[in-house]
Amino acid sequence: MKIDVQDSFGKVVESIKLDSKIFNIEVNSSVVRQAVLSELSNLRQGTHSSKNRSAVRGGGKKPWKQKGRGVARAGTIRSPLWKGGGVVFGPEPHVYNKKLPKKMSKLARKSVLTKKVQDKELIVLDSINISSKKTADFISFMKSINILNKKTLVLVDSFQENLILSSRNIRNVFIENVKTVSVYDLLDSEIILIDKLGVNTFSEVLA
């Protein structure tokens, strides 16, 4: 399976062969779903908390005597029935982490990459080198390869200062390392921008 390689002006300069074991597999949407749920769950802090009736301060003394007042009996002012009382079955600190086997994680990324290639949402450049720190120059670069106003994920082997500075004010451009990019980020983007070196890195990491 081959894909065109473009230069920074959107001109096709060559074609390269994609590893069919990574970019041309049977898409497993079930595994992709599990991977995304795992990643999103692992982002949760799980620090939500509330106080039950035993944790709320006060309420040690019986508010009034059991009989003779003509009102409902009460044993504590911290009952869940009272204002300021404890919470019944409220949220407690909880670990949401979900582990995913490495093979499933790799399969999920391969599936998303395959789908992106099929949908022509993967653009391969000969190199991603931004010579200027100006946002206007990066916008011109995006226009030249016809991806302006599209949610773009730029995958690089190493972060370049010019690339980060020139793109950080563009809300729909995200830069990630090709070795550590998540399934969610791959799936959430409209366009994946990568260079030839990044394609080779994928072949090594996901082999």
Image: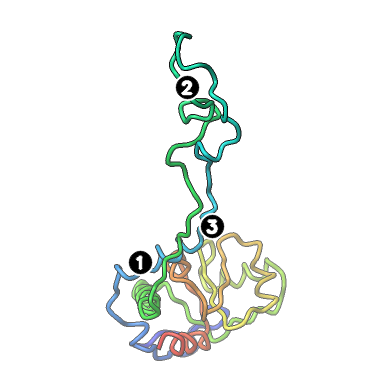
Query: What residue do we see at 46% from left, 17% from top?
Result: 66
Instruction: Please indicate whether residue 46 sits to the left or right of residue 100 in the image.
Output: right
Q: Is residue 18 above or below residue 105?
A: below
Instruction: Please indicate whether residue 183 sits to the left or right of residue 64 in the image.
Output: left
State how many labels appear.
Answer: 3
Disc number placed over residue 74 in the picture, else none: 2
Q: Nearer the viewer, residue 38 or 158?
A: 38
Image coordinates for residue 99, horizontal then vertical, percent: 41, 70
Earlier along the polypeptide chain: callout 3 or callout 2? 3
* Mark 3 Cα shell of 10 Å, populated few (<14), some (14-19), many (≥20): few
* Mark 2 Cα shell of 10 Å, populated few (<14), some (14-19), many (≥20): some
Place residue 143 in its image quadrant.
Answer: bottom right
Disc number placed over residue 34 in the picture, else none: 1
Determine whether the residue tagged by mark 3 lies in a helix, strand or loop: loop
Query: What residue do we see at 36% from left, 71% from top?
Result: 119
Give how far apart the Cα atoms at labels 1 and 3 are.
19 Å
- Say whether marks 3 and 2 touch (CB < 8 Å): no
Query: What residue do we see at 48% from left, 55% from top?
Result: 94
Q: Nearer the viewer, mark 3 or mark 2?
A: 2
Determine whether the residue tagged by mark 1 lies in a helix, strand or loop: helix
Place residue 128 in its image quadrant.
Answer: bottom right
Q: Is residue 28 above or below residue 53?
A: below
Image coordinates for residue 16, horizontal then vertical, percent: 43, 90
- Which residue in the protein does label 3 denote? 45
Q: Is residue 140 above or below residue 45?
A: below
